Image (spheres, rainbow, N blue to C red):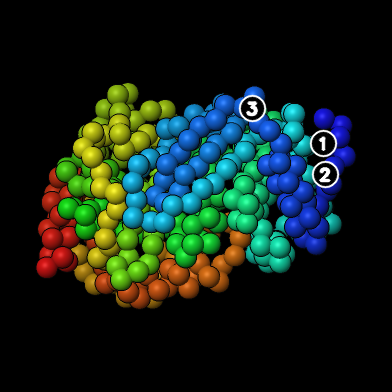
Amino acid sequence: METAERSQPLVVRTDTVASYVEALIEQVGGTRHGSMQERRIALPGLSIRLFSQDEMLTRAAETSFIQTSRSDLPEAGLTVFIGYPEGTFPEPASWSPHDRYQPHKVAQALSQKRLHASYFYDLDHWHAYDPKSQIAVQLLKAPGAFPPWEAGAPLRPFLHWHYAERGMRLAHAGTLGLDGRGILLAGAGGSGKSGTVIAGLLNGLESMGDDYVLLSPGDVIRAYPLFSTLKQDPEGIQRLKLDAARNCGRLNWQGKHQFTIRDLTTAPQPDYLDIGALVVPRVTGGDHTHFSPLARKEAIVEFAASSIYQMPGERESGFRFFSDVVNRLPCFRMDLGRHPREIADQIATFIQKAGT
């Protein structure tokens, strides 16, 4: 343990972060981890070997993903190590109080060595990734010492960096579809995005996820599933007529019920959805759901801002990616009715018309 601590700097700055991340990945990734439990996770075009010391994050990884055994994406591999100071995991470095942590500048400094990392100041919590070796390290200060949102979307920074290297992106958006065609749902908290996804799932529609989906550009913009996590506040649970005790789990750090697609439906979801429109929902309290055209300028604000904000590191390539998505898709405002079945029926009709 003393050797591990001496081999890592305890305080880092923007000009030393690349050296720290490089040494951390080499130290943790270059050691045998036979004593750690291994998990395998199969995602679109990606096979993950996960070695984790943290029981909560291990359970989150086991339950939060929509795993797939096949994909039309080229296959790649990723090895992820999650641990805290014990064995080969060193004490995590703190950020220098004399150098303000600025994610964009840190990403620029790391890019010189083609590395990626993010740091959560309150917990001295690190994500570090080397795309050359395909090794990722999540370093905690102690068991369970990770940000509260981590369990809902485990490994998210690593997936963001890995897929971005391949020209794809994680988007902060929901999806609904029918027969392999679908829509992206974008919007800030309270817009009705999550409730709309749940209403669709309860009434026969397909989904690649509620919070984060993988987007791949091409002749057609295609959405792939990653996370199975769904979230809804208690008022929404009542509005959707769900049995919170049976379907919706405990309240999370946001005061929302957190559960999964599998808790709502056993119907098989497709391997992907071909996206035909970007839709921004709005809760109006009206009786009927209806669609109206939305200016691309407004759509890009609703869609790109949160997607870029919630992903660590660089901004420019992300903004270009999401701007391209918005420019390629017709954009609509969806004023939501009050009845889940009516909302789902209107979305199904919209998707069918968009495909003609």
Q: Is residue 230 left or right of residue 53?
A: left
Q: In the picture provided, is 94 more to the left or to the right than 71? A: right
Residue occupied by mark 2 = 8
Foreground residue, 141 or 68? 68
Mark 1 burial class by Cα count in 10 Å: few <14, some 14-19, many 20+: some
Residue 295, labelled with which disc? none
- Residue 187 x, y percent position in the rendering: 37, 58
Secondary element at image label 3: loop
How dense is the environment of label 2, judged by Cα within 10 Å: few (below 14), some, or many (20 and up)? Answer: some
- Cα separation between marks 3 and 2: 23 Å
At x 40%, y 35%, the residue is 258
Residue at mark 1: 4
Asked if the residues shown at circle 2 and circle 1 are in contact, with their CB atoms under 8 angstroms apart, the answer is yes
Q: Amino acid at mark 3?
A: Gly
Q: Determine the image quadrant of residue 292.
A: bottom left
Amino acid on which the number 2 mark rests in the picture: Gln
The residue type indicated by label 1 comes to: Ala
Separation (CA) of disc 1 from disc 3: 18 Å
Looking at the image, how many numbered discs can be counted on the residues?
Answer: 3
CB atoms of marks 3 and 2 within 8 Å: no
Q: Report crowding for label 3: few under 14, some 14 to 19, many 20 or more residues within 10 A (C-alpha).
A: few
Q: Which residue is mark 3?
A: 34
Which quarter of the figure is the N terminus placed in?
top right
Q: Position of residue 219 (x, y in %)?
A: 30, 71
Judging depth in this view, the residue of 25 and 133 nearest the camera is 133
- Of tags 1 and 3, the one toward the viewer is 3
Q: Residue at x 33, y 46 (%)?
A: 70
Q: Is residue 276 above or below residue 283?
A: below
